[in-house]
Image: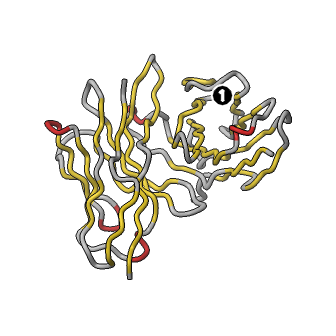
Amino acid sequence: AQSVTQPDIHITVSEGASLELRCNYSYGATPYLFWYVQSPGQGLQLLLKYFSGDTLVQGIKGFEAEFKRSQSSFNLRKPSVHWSDAAEYFCAVGALRQGAQKLVFGQGTRLTINP
Amino acid sequence: KAGVTQTPRYLIKTRGQQVTLSCSPISGHRSVSWYQQTPGQGLQFLFEYFSETQRNKGNFPGRFSGRQFSNSRSEMNVSTLELGDSALYLCASSLEGGPLMNTEAFFGQGTRLTVV
């Protein structure tokens, strides 16, 4: 069955520091992978997506992610975080299960930024 | 262009009641999906509607239902509410629907349902 694991429930980094959020997926075929961000009380905003091609994907707000098939990973990175990046981040895989297409989400990683 | 609009934003209901949530997708989008978000279970897929037909369904009981109108607006209904139905309900719209169809899903701000 398709699944997504985000090993870190909560991460704290200092403003200006680099960031890496981990995501591992389980999927039999080539996955469609997504990173979403959710600010408190808000919906989800797509940061970036991987469908095929170049394994390093650039997204909005200075984020990037790298698809590594051998490690079944799709980690999100940002070289220098800003206080406004504090939010919850969700990794998701586009899954086909019993004919149903849907997004399967990880449990999320809450990011706190220290000033 | 306007984003995905969900109404109401907040709702408080009593156990046993029923509730209807509304989602207006981005103009031109024909697919609407619904997700339930809770602290314990995270984000879970409820169902997807495309051109007024339920195309996909998640693993939720029959108390959860929905429909889509000809203008692509969608409603979700939950009958016989239980305390465990308290959650943030998110709606997502996309052009053709389904992440495997290589289209982006845009999410609304959600409806926060509290069952007391």
Q: Residues within 10 Å of mark 1 (few under 14, many from 20)?
A: some
Residue A73 position in % (x across, y down)? 23, 43
List x then y, in percent, for residue B1: 57, 59
Q: Is residue A77 above or below residue B44?
A: below
Front one among B89 and B16: B16
The chain under label 1 reads B
Look at mark 1 in the image and give the residue it sits on. B52
Residue shown at 64% from the left, 48% from the top: B88
Quarter placement of the N terminus of chain A = top left
Task: State the image quarter where residue A109 is shown.
Answer: bottom left
What amino acid type should be assigned to the residue bearing mark 1?
A: Glu
Residue A6: image x %, image y %?
A: 35, 46
Q: Quadrant of the C terminus of chain A?
A: bottom left
Q: Residue at x 45, y 27 (%)?
A: A101
Numbered disc 1: secondary structure: loop
**At 78% from the left edge and 34% from the top edge, which residue is drawn?**
B81
How many tags in the picture?
Answer: 1
- At which x and y percent is residue A31? 29, 33
* Residue B107 against residue B83 in the figure, above or below: below
